[in-house]
Amino acid sequence: MAENHDHHEHGPDCNHAPKTGIKTARNIIAIASGKGGVGKSTVTVNLAVALQATGANVGILDADIYGPSQPGMMGAKADAVESEGNLIVPTERFGVKMVSMGLLLGPDREDTPVIWRAPMAVKILNQFISGVAWGDLDYLLIDLPPGTGDVQLTLAQQASLSGAVIVTTPQQVALGIAKKGLRMFQQVNVPILGIVENMSGYTCGHCGELTDLFPSGGGETMAKELKVPFLGKVPMDSAILAAGDAGVPVVSRDPGGKPAQAFLVLARELQMKLLQFNKTGNAEPEKVELNGTGQLFIRWSDGHHGLHRPWTLRTRCA
Ligand code: ADP
């Protein structure tokens, strides 16, 4: 684990569990949106690379069977897919592992429509859920197709989600539809880890000034109204679009730039929220020690253990 990464294990035996199937991932997070085009896939890839930059092992499961966009945004080639017996070996890009229908379609994926009925799509998703050799993952991000249909429900119910992140743009129409997605998760008891407001204002490519195209802050207001966390805002920035088109997430292409910073803040907020949601009820700390990298190792009486930065503990436990 890297220095600034806080994590929890799901119990004392997890190191011996077979590293296949998504249930071995410590945190499984659905990235969802009410409608398409709000930047859900862009947020997923950049969040993944930002989490990986904290030293975590990260995977992306592209659950958009009919319109997979992860391979394009991650610059992944279809011929890179390998298998190990019955298991799919995830493709690795920018230190992040991924599986996507787009990678299984072959090199002509851009022009190949996926024409399947829902049961077939659900079958493929089940293969993605249980038949992938992920190895040791701290975070698995599931890029859900937009909406609240069969695929979304299957995943919400079968994927043992730690929680969901809802991506929206600030316009009223997008917010209204995002609320429906949010309620779907609440109905199946999946915690909402937070709302991300994407395309929140426009950053001028020449002077860097931020201008609100739509009234900004809608995502934050919605979070307050629905009493769910707000994770942060990402402006509309041509660098984000250009990086996505080039198949290199902007966090990797220009880690010091403003767009990358917005995603790094989101990743940090998400880690905090997971820490809060994973908190261990009434368990007592059994062992606490400072390791060589300045992090605190804590093992709890119920078997959970984790590494924490002292700064995080100070701010969380004040
Ligand atoms: P979704 O997954 O919600 O359908 P995408 O992530 O595919 O949306 O984004 C749609 C388009 O908008 C893509 O071309 C992407 O590069 C672009 N885009 C997304 N977010 C931003 C942003 N913050 N700034 C500029 N372009 C963006």
Image: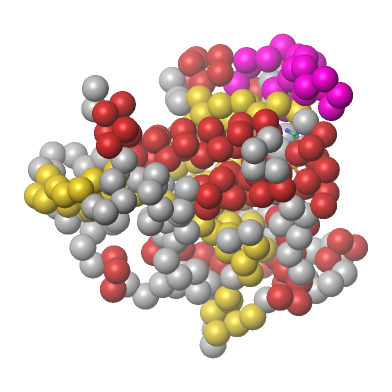
Q: Residue at x 50, y 25 (%)?
A: 230
Q: Which residues are magenta?
A: 198-219
Viewer-proximal residue among 87 and 301: 301
Q: Is residue 66 visible?
A: no
Compared with residue 69, is residue 46 higher up or lower down, i.e. above or below? above
Q: On the image, which quarter does residue 101 sit in?
A: bottom right
Q: Residue at x 23, y 59 (%)?
A: 11
Q: On the image, which quarter does residue 80 sit in?
A: bottom right
Q: Is residue 165 magenta?
A: no
190 relative position to 108: left or right: left
Query: Which quadrant of the frame does ligand 1 lie within?
Result: top right
Q: Which part of the image, by quadrant, shows the N terminus?
A: bottom left
Residue at the far right: name it. Answer: 111
286 relative position to 281: left or right: left
Viewer-proximal residue among 290 and 283: 290
Q: Is residue 9 visible?
A: yes
Image position, residue 128 (x, y; %)? 56, 67
Q: On the image, which quarter does residue 219 sit in?
A: top right
Image position, residue 221 (x, y; %)? 56, 14
Image position, residue 274 (x, y; %)? 38, 40
Q: Is residue 205 magenta?
A: yes
